[in-house]
Image: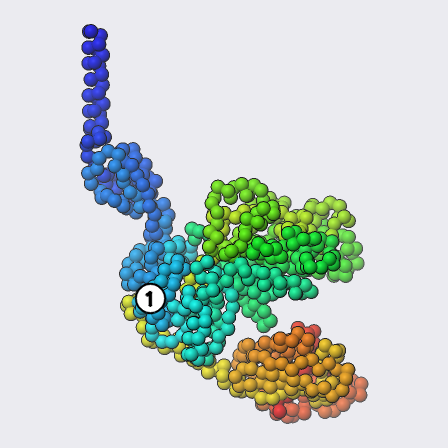
């Protein structure tokens, strides 16, 4: 009994001591304790209140017996910084084990819900992001707009129509900061509230207001398939009546079948040139931390797509993105025929580029990745002559990492290098079957295992998977052909064996890394306003954000649009008329599908109209000249060079058999009466006679009958740019001139 009593006494003493210990620290369940102040938390961490991180605060709170939970929001503090308590205040009495909410900073960004709110309501919040914030006015008709999340809102003056970065996305460029597009009904133009509307309704509205309308597809989210997702001029911009407006409407993977059919039809061409711009847009990781821009750049013949990862056409060249190339052995294989067009031609579409399958996916890569070789040391690899990949008659070869200008070197010495390009994308539109692509073994097996734990990509949004060169070894990224295929005699010596070309038909291919996942996907960022065009919208003065009528800025913008339209119309009227060339007034070599024409071929008549349209017809005098076809077209661009000179660009005919200089879609110049002729040497009558008689070595052209003695034009002429047709403007037999009657 004494022993039991002693044990009880000891236990009571221990309990009392423990209770005293816990009680002095406020850790007993029935006790209340204050939430530590920020000064206390900072002092224990050896930090300042402003430098406290969410991790530090959580650590101290848990050590004092509190439970914690976290939430995040954008702020002017760096990512990870502690912002505030979400559910309690400093010094508030809580019981042991109660929950304390910690708000953690995500860094600067656009808080969710900014779009659709009043610009004045978000001004203070955005100003607190500590990055530049610019407000710009976008035109609205005051109608309803469906945003990228599917929510419908009525855009009234002063409402936020869009932001860049997009609503709920972080700021990745702190120098550019945040741009806020604020709706205004002042002025006229292309309403931003067209976004998400029915295309037929939008077209009817534009045409009723005097605009002309064209259509182009754009890959879009599931919610926007068949709806307006953009325009050119951009949604929300000022545009004078009469302007041609291109409407972009949302499409899904169904359009890939049409791309596939067109590629087969172009089996003799180098690549698929059209419809690819449907992929243009901004693509970002789900958290907005990393983005790729696919931008459209339209030249005189076609519109090309470029990636922000590889630069534009004037940066190292050959950076256009294409889904298919004739240089790759499997690419233009036609599964409907049994003709073998190369050693690596695939017997089934499953072994061809993804474009030729029925998965709805396709690849995008640069022209240089497929057609260019590399030569040099590991530290200094450079592009080299594209035509040297198989040796032959090239003036350059690559030997032991050195480019040699030696046409006598045997082609067997060619040792081109392979370099993995920054751009190799698998594009996955809405409705595409990426699982089928994975099952083909397209992606690396280890990458697939890693992706399995990262979640599936969002199939309701178009995305691309970008091959990451950093996931490959140095040798895989850059190597010589003999490193890959020691027995060069046993393989095709074209670029189809480049292991960096990941088409399934390439037996040398490296499987693509990473594999598709929620973390690896770059998602299309849909936005009513194109981020690339935001700078063109008028800026709103700080004091007028709530009422963005900005009459001076808007009228200036409208005035510029009206002035540009007026100048364009004046240019059309200045060059309008009927032109022709006819032997022997001007020397030329005319190319028609039947052969080379001459004096007996006849006359080409070209009519330029004041509305920018034109027509051309050919009159045959005698055979064997092929008359080609009569056709109409448009002047796609006209620029005034000076008072007597206009640069023009022609659309070219739909009939590919027509081969005159104008019908190739070439650029040209119209020289008005009174212009000094300097581009092509002018022959005097005596000089022309000497040249015709074979006397002397003259390089001049017979335009003397339309110029005065000082070389000033007495009649207006159109001089096409025929450089792309291998014509020499300074040669006596290759000078096209259309004379206005």
Give residue 681's position: percent from left, percent from top: 68, 83
| Residue drawn at point x = 21 percent, y = 24 percent | 19
The structure's colour scheme is: rainbow
Return the x and y of residue 654 as percentages of the image width and height: 62, 75
Q: In which quadrant will I find the C terminus?
A: bottom right
Residue 247 position (above or below residue 128): below
Drawn side of residue 502 relative to residue 87, left or right:
right
Q: Find disc 1 in the rendering and name its residue.
A: 154
Residue 474 occupies quadrant: top right
Q: Residue at x 68, y 57 (%)?
A: 335
Question: Residue at the location (19% across, 14% down)?
Answer: 9
Instruction: Name the foreground residue: 409 vs 360.
Output: 360
Quadrant in which the N terminus is drawn: top left
Report which quarter residue 716 is drawn in.
Answer: bottom right
Q: Secondary structure at mark 1?
A: strand
Q: Return the residue nearer the eye: 735 or 562.
A: 562
- The answer to whether residue 451 is seen in the rendering is yes
- The x, y position of residue 148, in whole percent, is 41, 60
Position of 355 with respect to 391 (left or right) is left
Asked if residue 422 lies left or right of residue 386, the reply is: left
Whole-percent x, y for residue 515 in the image = 54, 47
Residue at 35%, 62% in the rendered image: 152
Q: Is residue 164 left or right of residue 659?
A: left
Dot 1, how many residues are within 10 Å of its Cα: few (below 14), some (14-19), or many (20+)?
Answer: some
């Amino acid at each position: 009994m004494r022993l039991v009593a002693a044990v009880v006494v000891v236990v009571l003493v221990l309990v009392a001591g423990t209770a005293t210990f816990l009680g002095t620290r406020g850790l007993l369940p029935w006790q209340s304790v204050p939430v530590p102040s920020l000064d206390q938390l900072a002092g224990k961490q050896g930090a300042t209140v402003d430098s406290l991180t969410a991790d530090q605060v959580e650590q101290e709170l848990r050590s004092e017996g509190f439970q914690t939970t976290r939430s995040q929001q954008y702020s002017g503090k760096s990512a990870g910084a502690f912002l505030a308590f979400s559910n309690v205040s400093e010094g508030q009495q809580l019981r042991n084990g109660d929950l304390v909410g910690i708000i953690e900073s995500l860094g600067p960004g656009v808080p969710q819900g900014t779009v659709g709110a009043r610009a004045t309501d978000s001004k203070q919040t955005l100003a607190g992001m500590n990055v530049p914030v610019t407000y710009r006015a976008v035109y609205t008709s005051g109608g309803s707009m469906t945003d990228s999340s599917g929510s419908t809102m009525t855009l009234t003056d002063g409402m936020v129509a869009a932001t860049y970065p997009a609503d709920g996305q972080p700021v990745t460029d702190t120098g550019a900061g945040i741009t806020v597009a604020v709706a205004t009904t002042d002025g006229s133009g292309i309403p931003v509230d067209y976004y998400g509307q029915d295309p037929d309704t939008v077209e009817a509205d534009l045409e009723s207001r005097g605009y002309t309308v064209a259509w182009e597809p754009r890959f879009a989210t599931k919610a926007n398939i068949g709806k307006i997702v953009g325009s050119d001029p951009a949604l929300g911009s000022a545009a004078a009546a009469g302007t041609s407006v291109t409407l972009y409407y949302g499409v899904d993977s169904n359009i890939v079948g049409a791309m596939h059919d067109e590629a087969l039809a172009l089996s003799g061409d180098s690549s698929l040139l059209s419809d690819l711009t449907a992929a243009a847009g901004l693509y970002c990781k789900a958290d907005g931390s990393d983005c790729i821009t696919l931008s459209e750049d339209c030249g005189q013949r076609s519109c090309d797509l470029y990636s922000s990862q590889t630069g534009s056409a004037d940066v190292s060249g050959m950076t256009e993105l294409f889904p298919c190339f004739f240089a790759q052995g499997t690419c233009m294989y036609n599964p409907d025929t049994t003709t073998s067009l190369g050693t690596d031609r695939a017997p089934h579409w499953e072994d061809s580029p993804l474009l030729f399958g029925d998965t709805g996916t396709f690849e995008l890569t640069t022209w240089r990745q497929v057609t260019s070789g590399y030569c040099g040391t590991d530290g200094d690899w450079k592009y080299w002559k594209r035509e040297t990949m198989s040796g032959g008659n090239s003036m350059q070869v690559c030997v032991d990492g050195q480019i040699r200008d030696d046409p006598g070197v045997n082609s067997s010495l060619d040792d081109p290098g392979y370099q993995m390009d920054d751009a190799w994308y698998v594009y996955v539109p809405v409705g595409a079957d990426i699982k089928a692509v994975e099952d083909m073994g397209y992606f690396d097996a280890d990458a697939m295992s890693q992706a399995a734990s990262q979640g599936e990509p969002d199939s309701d949004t178009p995305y691309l998977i970008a091959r990451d060169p950093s996931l490959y070894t140095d040798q895989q990224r850059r190597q010589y052909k003999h490193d890959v295929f020691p027995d060069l005699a046993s393989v095709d010596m074209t670029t189809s064996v480049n292991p960096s070309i990941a088409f399934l038909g390439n037996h040398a291919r490296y499987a693509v890394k990473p594999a598709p996942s929620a973390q690896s996907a770059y998602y299309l960022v849909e936005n009513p306003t194109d981020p690339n065009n935001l700078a063109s919208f008028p800026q709103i003065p700080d004091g007028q954000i709530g009422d963005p009528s900005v009459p001076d800025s808007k009228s200036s913008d409208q005035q510029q649009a009206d002035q540009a339209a007026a100048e364009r119309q004046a240019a059309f009227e200045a060059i309008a008329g009927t032109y022709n060339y006819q032997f022997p007034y001007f020397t030329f070599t005319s190319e028609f599908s039947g052969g080379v024409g001459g004096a007996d071929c006849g006359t080409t008549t070209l009519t330029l109209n004041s509305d920018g349209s034109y027509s051309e017809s050919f009159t045959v005098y005698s055979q064997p000249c092929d008359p080609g076809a009569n056709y109409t077209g448009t002047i796609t661009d006209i620029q005034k060079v000076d008072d007597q000179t206009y640069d023009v660009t022609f659309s070219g005919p739909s009939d590919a058999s027509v081969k005159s200089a104008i019908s190739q879609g070439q650029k040209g110049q119209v020289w008005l009466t009174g212009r000094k002729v300097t581009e092509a040497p002018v022959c005097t009558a005596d000089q022309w006679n000497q040249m015709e008689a074979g006397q002397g070595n003259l390089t001049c052209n017979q335009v003397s009958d339309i110029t005065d003695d000082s070389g000033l034009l007495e009649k207006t002429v159109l001089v096409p740019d025929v450089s792309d047709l291998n014509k020499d403007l300074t040669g006596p037999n290759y000078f096209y001139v259309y004379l206005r009657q």
